[in-house]
Amino acid sequence: MTIRTSPKPRTSPKPDAAPNRRNRIVASATLTAAILLISTFSLFADTASAPAPPAGKVNINQASPEQIAYLPRIGAKVAARVVDYRKTHGQFARPEDLMEVKGIGEKLFLTLKPYIAVSGPTTLAAKIRLGSSRKRDAASPAANKPPQKSAPASVPAGKGR
């Protein structure tokens, strides 16, 4: 018994490599264009989200408590402390000396730095309000609290608790 095997099917010669090469070139060009487009958008996004330059400055050596309260995150109490500190210790030699006042730490000072000066006129005319990093909901904080659990009905009130 002899088993006949069928001859292997002939494959056609390799097609020209040019279509594959063209596809690679098109894909590379598309990828390059996409990267360029994304980098352009990110460049515009960075410039759009940059903070606006300060609208004015407060001279902490001459300003009244009301003018100091124009600074971001500064209320009437801290503004009064700044004026009291200035009366007790003399004029501020440099802006960093403001951190000696109770209630003004390094983090708050870095927020205030673009708006304060130790010489020259006070040019800030309105309260600076910076956006908060916290998300605020329109609902009141009480609406976000989970409901309180009540005691089970099987335990009489005032007994054992």
Image (cartoon, grey):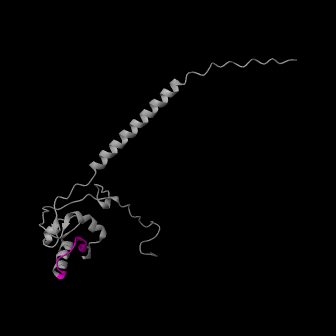
- Residue 135 locus on image (x, y percent): 32, 56
Q: Residue at x 38, y 61 (%)?
A: 147
Residue 93 is a magenta residue: yes
- Along the viewing direction, whichever of 127 and 19 lies nearer the viewer: 19
- List the single residue furthest toward the right: 1
The quarter of the picture where the N terminus appears is top right
Q: Quadrant of residue 65?
A: bottom left
Q: Is 137 located above or below residue 35 in the figure?
A: below
- Along the viewing direction, whichever of 131 and 139 lies nearer the viewer: 131
- Residue 112 locus on image (x, y percent): 24, 65
- Along the viewing direction, whichever of 130 and 25 lies nearer the viewer: 25
Q: Is 80 located above or below residue 19 in the figure?
A: below
Q: Is 144 located above or below residue 3 in the figure?
A: below
Q: What stretch of residues is rendered in magenta?
A: 88-98
Q: Is 32 located above or below residue 54 in the figure?
A: above
The quarter of the picture where the C terminus appears is bottom left
Q: Is residue 47 left or right of residue 124?
A: right
- Along the viewing direction, whichever of 156 and 72 lies nearer the viewer: 72
- Residue 7 locus on image (x, y percent): 74, 17
Q: Residue at x 52, y 27 (%)?
A: 20
Residue 160 is a magenta residue: no
- Residue 99 locus on image (x, y percent): 26, 73
Q: Residue at x 16, y 66 (%)?
A: 58
